[in-house]
Image (tube, rainbow, N blue to C red):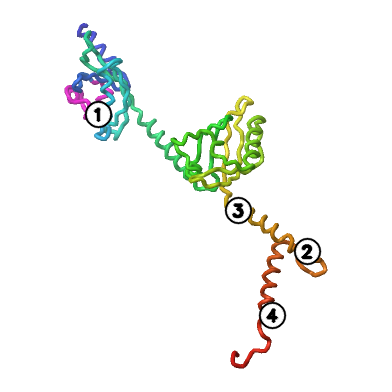
Amino acid sequence: MSIQDDTLYKELLDQQQDLLVKFSPEGRLMFVNRAYCEAMGKKEEELVGSVFMPAADERYADALATRMTSLFRPPYTCVVEQWISSPKGPRCISWAARSIADKDGNVTAIVANGRDVTPEKKRHRDITRRDSQLMLLIESGTPMYYTHTPDHTLLYVSPRIRAMLGCNSGSGKRLWTDYLTDNPINAKGLERTLKAISTGRREPPYRLEFAGRNGAKIRVEVNEIPVIRNNVTIAIVGSLVDVTEKMKVEEGLIEAEILLKDYSGHKKKNEGEPAGPFAALKSIFSKKAEKEEDDIPIDIPDSLK
């Protein structure tokens, strides 16, 4: 290649917006284009011959060096991200590197093309931060959220649901139905879900009983809606509300109704006795109080006054 060709080639590389470098197997820079010099805030003479790796932040240097060992074995390529200190502040450069090897497979040099992906990294960080804030907001409410496929395979489970049911990756449970107890109400709930999947229409809320951590039985109220694409249900999204304590109260009231039914039912209406279990309870306590009053002597001795 002539001197003129070398000049044209260098001008072509210097016009590239991407960062272009060539360095030895020992990590010494052999060539840098203008974009790389501008990114580093240094002249070409200062960079050529210097060590390429120190441009990386110390926190990432070891990981970067480990990834780049793939440049010394087939297929002699590597893609890494490198954070550098530049006049514009910390910048993230995505490098696509390839080794130049001789006929014996020995690496003689490495060429790399770098692109500044800092804006993308910042956007990703902002999205992650917003997602975290949104998740915090969602998790602070009463409902707990989930999604599953039409065949009941879990896609997403709220952290609070995981804690409530004791979900873990080693449990072997992939279907939400794996957590159901043998309570008859679960058959009715499953029927609602299957109907929503087949029709693509939202079903009214229903209740289920799950086997939670340490075998605890947990009652939940379920609100869910099918996700439709091309007239086919592709997923079910919904929310759970823990109603265990609420149902205990309800069941307690039902038992009270049964226990007090005879007491409140045998009273005649003309006796002026109020109907209902609560009224019966009140009557029991008031009668007890009356009985206790009857036990008090009417004539109290002077010594006790």
The quarter of the displayed image where residue 5 is located? top left
Which amino acid, by three-letter code, is at mark 3? Lys
Element under disc 2: loop
Q: Which residue is mark 4?
A: 294
Q: Which residue is mark 2?
A: 266
Q: Nearer the viewer, mark 1 or mark 4?
A: 4
Label 1–label 4 contact, CB within 8 A = no
- Name which of mark 4 and mark 2 comes first in the sequence: 2
Q: Which residue is found at the position 61% from the left and 55% from the top?
A: 249
Which amino acid, by three-letter code, is at mark 1? Met
| Mark 2 → mark 1, Cα distance in angstroms | 95 Å
| Mark 4 → mark 2, Cα distance in angstroms | 24 Å
| Mark 1 → mark 4, Cα distance in angstroms | 100 Å
Q: Is residue 66 above or below residue 191?
A: above
Q: Which residue is found at the position 23% from the left and 29% from the top?
A: 55
Which amino acid, by three-letter code, is at mark 4? Asp
Q: Nearer the viewer, mark 3 or mark 2?
A: 2
Residue interval drawn in magenta: 32-54
Task: In this rendered view, identify the residue nearer to me: 127 or 203.
Answer: 203
Rendering coords of residue 248 (x, y %): 60, 53
Q: Which residue is mark 1?
A: 40
Element under disc 1: helix
Mark 1 is surrounded, within 10 Å at the Cα level, by few (under 14), some (14 to 19) or many (20 or more) other residues, namely some
| Mark 1 → mark 3, Cα distance in angstroms | 68 Å
Q: Which residue is mark 3?
A: 248
Rendering coords of residue 83 (x, y %): 29, 31
